[in-house]
Image (cartoon, coloured by chain):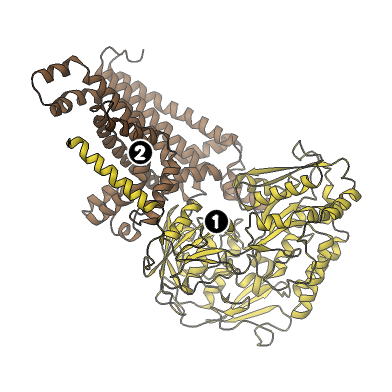
Chain colours: A brown, B yellow
Amino acid sequence: MQLRDYIIRRLIVLPILIIGVSIVVFSLTRISGSPVGIYLSHEMSPAEVQQIEARYGLDKPLPVQYYAWAKGVLQGDLGWSGVAAAPVTEVFPNKLAATMELAFSAGFVAVSLGIWLGTFAGARRNRWPDHITRIVAVSGASLPLFWLGILLLIIFWANLGWAPIGRSDATIWASIAHPTGLYTVDALLAGNLKAFGDAVWHLALPALTLGYGATAIIARMMRSSLVEELQQDYVDAARAKGLPERLVLRRHARRNALIPTVTVIGLTFGFLLQGTITAEIIFRWPGLGRWMADSVLRGDQATIMTYVLFTSVLFLMVNLVVDVIYAHLDRRVVLGG
Amino acid sequence: MNRYLSRPIISSLCVGAVLTLTAFQPAFAQEVNNPGLLVHAADDEPTSLDPAQVEPGEGGETVILQVYDRLLDIGPDSPELIPSLALEVPTVDNGLISADGLTYTFKLREGVVFHDGTALTADDVKYSWDRAMEMDLPEGNAGILSDYIAATAVVDDFTFQATLNEASASFLNSVVIAMVASIVSQDAVKANGGVEASVPNTFMSGNAVGTGPYKFSVWNRNENLQLEVFDDYWGENASLDVRIEIGGDPDVRVLGLRAGEFDTIETDPSFIADLEGVDGVTIYQEGLLLEPLHIGMNLNIPEGALPPEDTIPVDFFHDARVRQAFNHAFDYDAFLNGPLAGYGDFNPHYIPIGIFGYDAASPTYNKQDKAKAEELFRAAGYWDDGFTISVITEEGNLFALMCLVMKDSLEGLNPKFRVNVLAVAESVFDDAHAQDPLEYAMWAKNADPAADPNAYLQAYVHPDGDWGQVHGFANGYADPEAIGAMIDAAAVELDVVKRAEMYAEISKVLYDEPMWLIGAQEGVVAAHRDWVQGFTMQPLWPRPGFKFALFDK
């Protein structure tokens, strides 16, 4: 099958999959109970509860509720978030941007620090720098995120006052436009270095906390790969021809050691997204994770459904893109087989 | 030294040194942080800023108190009513309450402007009250207006009149100062969706246009809400802008206060130990919240509705001896000195300490009396065979802890007694609690705060009241009509002395016929930086009882 035909076929199937996913998501959230609870107060009378149910169409049969919800989704109406006290559509993009910014920043910390530490340790195998790095890596992988976060807060926020929490200084935030919702990017687009500094400064602690665990994984992977590469014949050949050790490491061994590490980096992004929930709660980061945690605890089903639907669609899209890339890279892959 | 080696070693040493030196360092020097701005760390996110939509006791009321005014107010130091947008507190003596007690006249302050620049007139007052009653949103508190008011009228630009359905001793304290009676800008509402019955106004839910000392600035959901000083305020201008930091981990709020990042925080007694002795932090602990923590008893249990583990008959609580026995069995000291960390007191059924009608001489359940409880359970016939009962509550808060104290109390009293505490998510609890009839024998919550005893007695005691009907109080009172009549009579008694005597009498009767187990009346507890001046809390203002306009730093 031609690549183009394959993509068209997948694109045709995609909406059917999305509808299927939406039915599953809708049904699963309803199994956990009526979504009306988030809109109620404990003093409401049964008659008032009925009024609320009627307002949100929750007094109708489930298929009708699903139809109304799906119709709303197609029209860009994802329902009312009881937790955020606003339409989901209005809140979701900003929360998503905040979470993505945090996850990418943590990813940046993890990748840069992990590769550097892995290289540093791999090049000094079984010497004490390697042991120190191992301790760093093991602690990163084993320290609970919430504990590390609180510890950093106590030191750098509560005691030293060096790092802020939250996402921004409210005044600086208000001084620039936010076309993308990514504070760092918006600050650069506005040409406002003060805002950029504020964004980075607010990102520092949560990104470091979140990135530390991933740093450990990447560093260990990088170290192992590098150790393996350094034992290869081509490395001996490079040394034999008189290449300085620094260049052997940089130009040859490290480059090859990066290949398996990059695979791990890809997988690590999922870990980072998961970790944003804890990091956002601790650092008062106004992102999707904190919003979702509140929503799950309080039964805000409009928000939960949006989140699950979003991630499902994202997964389907990424899957499609990956399949296409594989097919493009490796012609032996049989499309549609 | 190898350059690959040197940088990380030095960096590691530096970081290690910093960590060692700072981990146990006391909080920062006590300079005033954020001058000109009060940063308040709040517990809850508002669900709405619209007075017509806000639920009593909910986070939105905190904001409404600052940005809107009402005709009357309560000052910071006493429960007495004081003028606000109205120039005088109506009384029969000053002629602003008619002789028959039905018509209330309010002379309005002139020169008051809303945040949108329009001038306040009596028409705005009528519009605000009529609007809330017409919308009649189930999540709001409009019912309190429509329950009392027969008609509203504009006499002239600065005179407003309300005519009641019947004479009431509690109208001013229950209705006029309630957040639902806040005065909104008529122009702002009309320009943004107007009024529609049973439909929330989206603009007003997320914005505020009042006459209060603060004007609404911005609300970043799940993050913060900002208020600016309103320079054209009719009274004394506030000194500080306000940023309300919303939600988050309670430990982080405590840390933020210690760090000086927050000026004031909402907290509860369980966190006070973390703040005691902290340099630069003051713990405020005066007065009591007007929200008694109670466990309800269902006298209207449908057949077959209880959880399968429960062995009690559906008429279990119809017997006053059983209700009394639960009240005697509860370990009040354990609850007060445990979860409440000593911050609280006990009030009689059902009038809290701190409002008119509370009678210190009324008998109060405040000591565990195992012998009396055993005697009553024996007399009711439940001692020998025991019983299993479930109590539903929200998880992870004082209500759940109160239930656990009750469980320990009863199971410690008799090993044949079994109490299952069903701690569930708030939304699940609210959904279950709103059922009529309720499918659980007991539930735990707190009362909605009010400034007048009638509000409590109507809601939590009257056999024909909101809860009385749902939970079948008439099935348990020896003479429900007599109790209802006593409450109704006190509600319309305009003689203050006589009225106080009537409430004392009702409290005595309710000691013998309790419909609740009141665990305690929680103490007012808050914490603030020392640099906050003029800090005060008034339990009659919506929780947390702050008026930011009174603070300075």
User: Can the viewer see residue B434 in this picture?
Assistant: no
Which chain's residue wears label 2?
Answer: A
B481 w.r.t. A46: above or below: below
Q: Are labels 2 and 1 on one chain? A: no
B128 w.r.t. B157: above or below: above
Residue B307 has which mark? none
Residue labelled with disc 2: A212
In screen coordinates, is A112 left or right of B184?
Answer: left
Q: Circle 2 — which element?
A: helix
In screen coordinates, is A283 left or right of B14?
Answer: right
Which chain's residue wears label 1?
Answer: B
> Looking at the picture, how far across and down is residue B57, in whole percent?
59, 61
Q: CA distance from mark 2 to mark 1?
A: 30 Å
> Looking at the picture, how far across and down is residue A103, in whole percent?
35, 40
Give the quarter of the image for residue A193: bottom left
User: Can the viewer see residue B403 in this picture?
Assistant: yes
Residue that lies at the very extreme toward the left in this rendered image: A242
**Dot 2 alpha-carbon crowd within 10 angstroms: few under 14, some 14 to 19, many 20 or more:** many
**Dot 1 alpha-carbon crowd within 10 angstroms: few under 14, some 14 to 19, many 20 or more:** some
Residue labelled with disc 1: B271
Give the quarter of the image for residue B552: bottom left
Q: Residue at x 21, y 21 (%)?
A: A230
Please state which of residues B104 and B297 is positioned toward the viewer in this rendering: B297
> Looking at the picture, how far across and down is residue B106, in whole percent?
59, 80
What kind of residue is marked 1? Phe
